[in-house]
Image: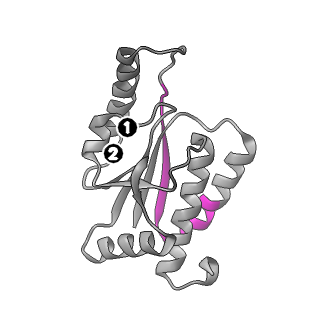
Amino acid sequence: MQVDIIAVGKIREAYIATGIHQYMKRLRAYGRFAIREIKEESYRDPLTTGQMEQVLQAEGERLLAAVPPDSFVVALTPEGRLYSSPELAKLMGDLIIRGQSRFAFLIGGSLGLSPEVLNRADLRLSFSPLTFPHQLFRLMLVEQLYRAATILRGEPYHR
């Protein structure tokens, strides 16, 4: 299994970076996992609708350009489908059995994901209808990927 987490922006909080680093170390036993940070567009609030669309488009183009070929693309968005941890593990396991071993999880910037990114996605996934800080969400994602990997192997972490 190869998983690319492609995210807009950099992690600025040391405690979040430490948590992400710990889960990324744990994930090495389950496959190849990488995080790619995409440049965040700078802007000043308030934005007009046109300016917002420009920011989303620029970030979206960079996200899509970073997606490796043959990836199963997962767009992380509050409007996506909710899965439990076992359901996400099962989905990934079923895809792996069918020969899909490369995944790209896309995390947008503070404005979200462009329509082009959402349209390219094979799955729109939501962790919750709540809004989370993007830095914290990246930590939550690597934890859930670790949880899914342990579920697939029947290991006790999930219990």
Kindly identify the amino acid type of the residue bearing the numbered disc 2: Val
Q: Is residue 29 magenta?
A: yes
In the image, 151 versus 53, the foreground residue is 53
Q: Secondary structure at mark 2?
A: loop
Kindly identify the amino acid type of the residue bearing the numbered disc 1: Leu
Residue 56 quadrant: top left
Separation of disc 2 and disc 1 at Cα?
Answer: 7 Å
Residue 116 is left or right of residue 16, and the answer is left
Rendering coords of residue 47 (x, y %): 47, 15
Q: Which residue corresponds to mark 2?
A: 67
Rendering coords of residue 80 (x, y %): 39, 52
In the image, 37 versus 123, the foreground residue is 123
Q: Residue at x 29, y 35 (%)?
A: 115
Rendering coords of residue 122 (x, y %): 27, 55
The C terminus sits in image quarter: bottom right
| Vertical relation: 42 (above or below) 68 | above
Q: Residues within 10 Å of mark 1 (few under 14, many from 20)?
A: many
Q: Residue at x 25, y 45 (%)?
A: 120
Q: Is residue 44 visible?
A: yes
Residue contact at pointers 2 and 1, CB within 8 angstroms:
yes
Q: Which residue corresponds to mark 1?
A: 63
The magenta span reads 23-40
Q: Is residue 27 magenta?
A: yes
In the image, 94 versus 46, the foreground residue is 46
